[in-house]
Image (spheres, helix red, strand yellow):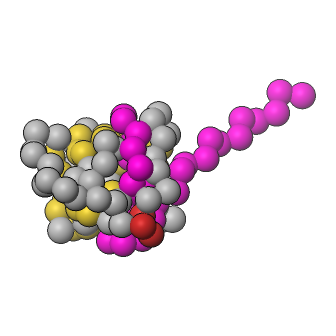
Amino acid sequence: MTTLKAGSRLKSAVCDTEVMVVRATADDVSLECGGAVMLALASEKPAGAAAHEAFAQGTLVGKRYTDADERFEFLCTKGGKGSLAIDGVLLVVKQAKALPSSD
């Protein structure tokens, strides 16, 4: 469990996914990708690690991922095969807010 800070960059231990923390609360949580805890960008990946089947829907570059309460938000800077999760709960792609009508 770690405390995430805005601006931090992390990478997956099991695929090519890389993210930047956009928003995070002060809670200690486990950010995971592909079922494995994410690593600091400068860390070495373990050899032979693979994404867990339940967490292999993939991440898309340029998309923002958030939890149901929108306490955390991550920008995917490099896509991969693993799915993002916090404490085992999958994150969803953040939807764009509708602009007001100009009629």
Image height of 56 relative to 100, above or below = below
Instruction: Tell me where the magenta segment starts and ends, as one range.
Output: 74-103
Q: Position of residue 79 (x, y in %)?
A: 41, 39
Q: Nearer the viewer, residue 63 or 44?
A: 44
Quadrant location, the N terminus = bottom left
Quadrant location, the C terminus = top right
Q: Which residue of the protein is positioned furthest toward the front in this rendering? A: 48
Instruction: State the image quarter where residue 56 is shown.
Output: bottom left
Kindly identify the residue that appears in the image at 83 percent across and 27 percent down: 102
Q: Which residue of the protein is positioned furthest toward the right in this rendering? A: 103
In the image: residue 96, left or right of residue 52: right
Image height of 73 relative to 96, above or below = below
Kindly identify the residue that appears in the image at 48 percent across and 41 percent down: 60
- Report the number of numbered marks: 0
In the image: residue 44, left or right of residue 32: left
Image height of 103 relative to 94, above or below = above
The answer to whether residue 102 shows anywhere in this view is yes
Instruction: State the image quarter where residue 54 is shown.
Output: bottom left
